Amino acid sequence: MIKEFFNNIIIKLSNSLNDKLILYNYKQIVGGSINTAFLINTNKGKFFLKLNNNKIKYLFDNEVRGLKLISSTNTINVPKVIYFDDEVLVLEFIESKHINKKFWSNFGYSLAELHYNTSNSFGLDHDNYIGSLLQSNKFHDNWNNFFIYQRLKPQLDIGNFSFKTHKLFEILFLKFDNIFSLTKPSLLHGDLWSGNFISTNDQVFLVDPAVYYGNREMDIAMTKLFGGFVKEFYDSYNYHYPLFKNWQTRIDICNLYPLLVHANLFGGNYYNQIHSILKSVTQ
């Protein structure tokens, strides 16, 4: 059954590339917690394949749109899209390599260049996904309203959060005008943790985007959600596109969004992390 599946994929790839592909072998590889991923080895090279395990409508269509939007800025690398449909997404295979001393400064510079791409409003002209959850991107004229109504409240509404947590969020929302600086929308990767980039010597490739035009501190904050990147990355980013004063104090508030997403997807200790942040910022 699985052999027949991959043979059908090879036929689709051959038609897409207008070239005859021969499958040598395939193996399952790490591809995140939402989808199953494979490395396909063919006579025309290696490809990365991802399965839409949960059969989410337009999941890969939106991922491809995000990759192409980032690619169109000519600022930071993404893998080439080879083929996609509702079931599978096939990308060029980018082999991770040991980084050299220029990697992190180049990464910071490239992300800053991506963030210089702007829009008239916060949001995007279509909704997409973060993980397997719908991400609403309706346009707003200011960041605070977008963050509340398109990011935090939708996750609160679908989650199993206590009455106390909801009340603490309401208190926090009233403080936003005194927390966030006025900023213009930047094109964001939207899910920028260490598992969503590939390092190749001195260059970076971004994968699994959840793009929208938002506050660039969201991307920076998420790099710190699971341990943080190295100092050279932040120094380089700040040199090329300085962050607003006291940006470090807003990291936890920005990360409430991905923490809500993780709580809704995986449960566990994420509820405690959210509650701990809320208590510290609403006192």
Image: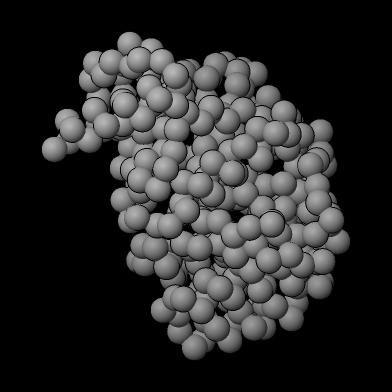
Q: Can residue 65 be seen?
A: yes
Q: How many marks?
A: 0
- Give above or below for 174 relative to 247: below
Q: Report which quarter residue 73 is drawn in.
A: top right
Q: Which residue is located at x 34 percent, y 55 percent?
A: 55
Q: Report which quarter residue 214 is drawn in.
A: bottom right
Q: Which residue is located at x 28 percent, y 15 percent?
A: 22
Q: Report which quarter residue 41 is drawn in.
A: top left
Q: Which residue is located at x 45 percent, y 33 percent?
A: 83
Q: Which residue is located at x 36 percent, y 62 percent?
A: 266
Residue 152 in percent (x, y) is at: 60, 71
Residue farthest along the left direction in this orientation = 1
Residue 185 in percent (x, y) is at: 79, 54
Q: What scheme was used to colour the molecule?
A: one colour
> Quadrant where the C terminus lies?
bottom right
Q: Nearer the viewer, residue 85 or 159?
A: 85
Q: Is residue 86 left or right of residue 141?
A: left
Q: Nearer the viewer, residue 249 or 99?
A: 99
Q: Is residue 215 left or right of residue 137?
A: right
> Quadrant where the N terminus lies?
top left
Residue 204 in percent (x, y) is at: 58, 27
Residue farthest along the top direction in this orientation = 43
- Give above or below for 133 relative to 233: below
Q: Can residue 96 be seen?
A: no
Residue 252 in percent (x, y) is at: 61, 61
Q: Is residue 258 left or right of residue 69?
A: left
- Give above or below for 59 relative to 141: above
